[in-house]
Image: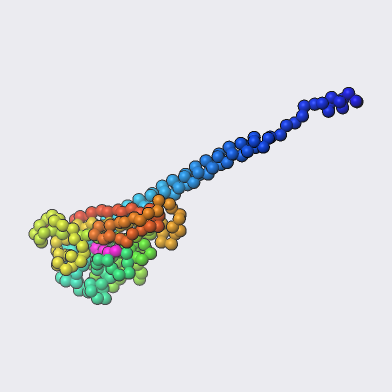
Amino acid sequence: MTGFMKRSSTGQRQRGLTLVELMIAMTIGLVVITAIGNLFISTNKSVTLGDALSRNQETGRFTLEYITNYARLAGYSEDGTMPDIPLYVTSNHPSLSVDCTGADADACAADDVTGIRGDRLALPYYASSRTLADCAGGQAGGTLAARYVVNVFWVNTDGVLMCRAFDGQTKAWLTTAASPILTGIETMEVLVGVSPDEESFHVSSYVSISDVINGGLNNQVLALRVSVLVTSQEQDTNAEALDTNKQVRTYAVLDKRLPDFEDGFLRHIFTTTIDFTNSRYN
């Protein structure tokens, strides 16, 4: 028994870490944790930026495609009994008496309308025996009474693309309220392609809606150029949610320069040009 205890007391002693070794281990661990944290933050920012870019592209493309679909209906008249006007900007229409400066002004196109973000676009067509849909999804023509429909588009103060259909013959809106189409739009601007005279078949210049109205160019309208500024965030979202290297950013959307932005949100301008294929020149 004594020999056993003696051998046990002289066995190999256990050794711990020295202070230097502990500090080295902690330093290495801190470096590794910092590297992993930076990689996570960088990856998270990349994913957020990629999502914002994808969302902007989807919003911009869908907005312009949606407006284009109804712009191609503009001036349509199945039986040819109605004058083919592709842009509704004047009360001097031979078949209608809509007051574009009075009670029915909201059914007419206009530049930089108070209370909305940018321009208001009004695209009329005549629906008779053929069933057509207005911009809010309502039915026009077909089994319903023939009517002169004006599809009206604008961006409200919350950055939402809105549409509403107007009956140009009964002088009444076809829906009780406007329909929201898409969010995330800062503004919509419009330029109108006009010919040099009423006998020409080509666009000589792009002018504002006001120029069309003031110059009496409604019978010379051949095309439309629409541009929207899309943002990755909704109006009241935390500005720190997406870091795009905050700095003053300036945007000019067609003929309009917007106030500078410095909120770090990702923005893109999308533009398309649309020929009015139903104009009387075609």
Determine if residue 235 is in view. yes
Q: Residue at x 64, y 35 (%)?
A: 21
Across and down, in percent, residue 246 comes to 40, 53
**Residue 221 horizontal/vertical position (percent):** 17, 61
Task: Please provide percent x and percent y for residue 135.
Answer: 31, 62
Q: Which residues are magenta?
A: 118-123
In-front residue for pair 13/19 = 19
Q: Is residue 97 left or right of residue 162?
A: left
Of residues 226 and 201, the one nearer the viewer is 226
Residue at far bottom of view: 103
Residue 212 in percent (x, y) is at: 17, 65
Left or right: residue 206 versus residue 23 is: left
Is residue 50 within the magenta segment? no
Which residue is at a point 38% across and 57% down the rendered structure image? Answer: 262
Colouring: rainbow
Which quadrant holds the N terminus?
A: top right
